[in-house]
Image: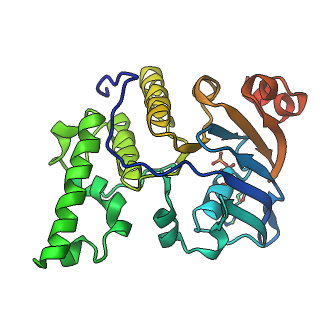
């Protein structure tokens, strides 16, 4: 079980204005497989946009294009006016893009605090390893980020776990640790890849409330891949539906929910 989190979450993550994400005609092939067949859409600053669709629709492929892990064959991906396709995966955090992974990206043997601090690695001039050699500037950087990580853990009700290794902690707790690590980026756009996967219903409700509370307080934009329709419908302002690499719907959740193409491609199949 995860600890109860109220809707009133206060986290010191530092303010950066939310970014608008522009996806324009993105195409990506793997040999003969078309992963992305030209979807275009916008995520407005501060909105929670759900990216849904059946298995193999291209959702994770698009996440990987945004976060620099895949290079599309053509198209444009921008955060405000910054061209993300000109950046490497290790550079996108610098402009305020944070993501979580479908299968968790935590280091099992590291402590919870070390895992969360890893989210700020890009911010330090040296990296924490050099800092541990004792150079004063690096040491101050590390201490500053350590305090920020502690503040975020505290706000998410995880502070009592900071010295524990990630290994062996319940899945719901690990998901929140990953979220804490993403917050260390001071996100302008937070990308969540199936955060509810594997959680029990009560944990999904808690997570949904937490994501919305964080967005309400910090006004970052959220792009959410999620198969759990209860979570999607309860927190998304906007939905984009992919099927076979193409966008088949784009609009408010209530409208998209009843779109015949969506019912046919995805929601109907899941019902
Ligand atoms: N690295 C890769 N190599 C080859 N094919 C890939 C690769 N990544 C994705 N694909 C293919 O691209 C298509 C889209 O996959 P993707 O993982 O983006 O779907 P998805 O919508 O995230 O599905 P799911 O909901 O199951 O996670 C699929 O046909 C997949 O097999």
In this rendering, the answer to whether 21 lies above or below 236 is below
Between 100 and 120, the one nearer to me in the picture: 120
Measured from the top left, where is residue 105 in percent x and y?
A: 41, 56
In this rendering, the answer to whether 120 lies above or below 194 is below
- Residue at 62% in and 38% down: 47
Judge left or right: residue 269 versus residue 200.
Answer: right
Q: Is residue 109 visible?
A: no
Judge left or right: residue 161 versus residue 218.
Answer: left
Between 203 and 65, the one nearer to me in the picture: 65
The quadrant of the picture occupied by the C terminus is: top right
In this rendering, the answer to whether 227 lies above or below 144 is above
In this rendering, the answer to whether 246 lies above or below 137 is above
Colouring mode (rainbow / by chain / secondary structure / one colour): rainbow
The quadrant of the picture occupied by the N terminus is: top left
Q: Quadrant of ligand 1?
A: bottom right
Judge left or right: residue 49 versus residue 129.
Answer: right
Q: Is residue 153 visible?
A: yes
- Residue at 46% in and 25% down: 209
Measured from the top left, where is residue 137 in percent x and y?
A: 18, 75
For this orientation, the residue located farthest to the left is: 134
Residue 12 location, quadrant: top left
Between 202 and 96, the one nearer to me in the picture: 96
């Amino acid at each position: 079980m995860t600890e109860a989190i109220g809707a009133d979450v206060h986290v010191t993550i530092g303010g950066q204005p939310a970014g608008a994400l522009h996806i324009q005609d993105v195409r990506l092939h793997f040999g003969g497989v078309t992963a992305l067949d030209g979807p275009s859409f916008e995520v407005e600053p501060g909105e929670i946009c759900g990216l849904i669709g059946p298995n193999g629709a291209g959702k994770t492929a698009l996440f990987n294009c945004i976060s620099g892990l895949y290079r599309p064959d053509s198209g444009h991906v921008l955060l405000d006016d910054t061209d993300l396709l000109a950046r490497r995966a290790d550079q996108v955090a610098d402009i305020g893009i944070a993501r979580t992974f479908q299968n968790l990206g935590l280091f099992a043997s590291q402590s919870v605090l070390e895992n969360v601090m890893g989210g700020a690695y890009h911010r330090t001039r040296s990296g924490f390893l050099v800092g541990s050699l004792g150079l004063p500037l690096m040491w101050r950087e590390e201490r500053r980020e350590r305090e920020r990580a502690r503040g975020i853990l505290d706000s998410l009700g995880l502070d009592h776990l900071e010295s524990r290794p990630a290994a062996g902690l319940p899945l719901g707790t690990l998901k929140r640790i990953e979220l804490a690590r993403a917050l260390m980026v001071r996100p302008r756009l937070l990308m969540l890849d199936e955060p509810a996967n594997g959680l029990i219903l009560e944990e999904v409700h808690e997570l949904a409330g937490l994501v919305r509370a964080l967005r309400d307080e910090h006004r970052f934009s959220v792009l959410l891949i999620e198969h759990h329709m209860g979570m999607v419908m309860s927190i998304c302002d906007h939905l984009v539906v992919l099927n076979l690499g193409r966008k088949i719907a784009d609009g408010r959740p209530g409208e998209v929910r009843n779109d015949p193409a969506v019912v046919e491609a995805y929601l109907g199949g899941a019902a």
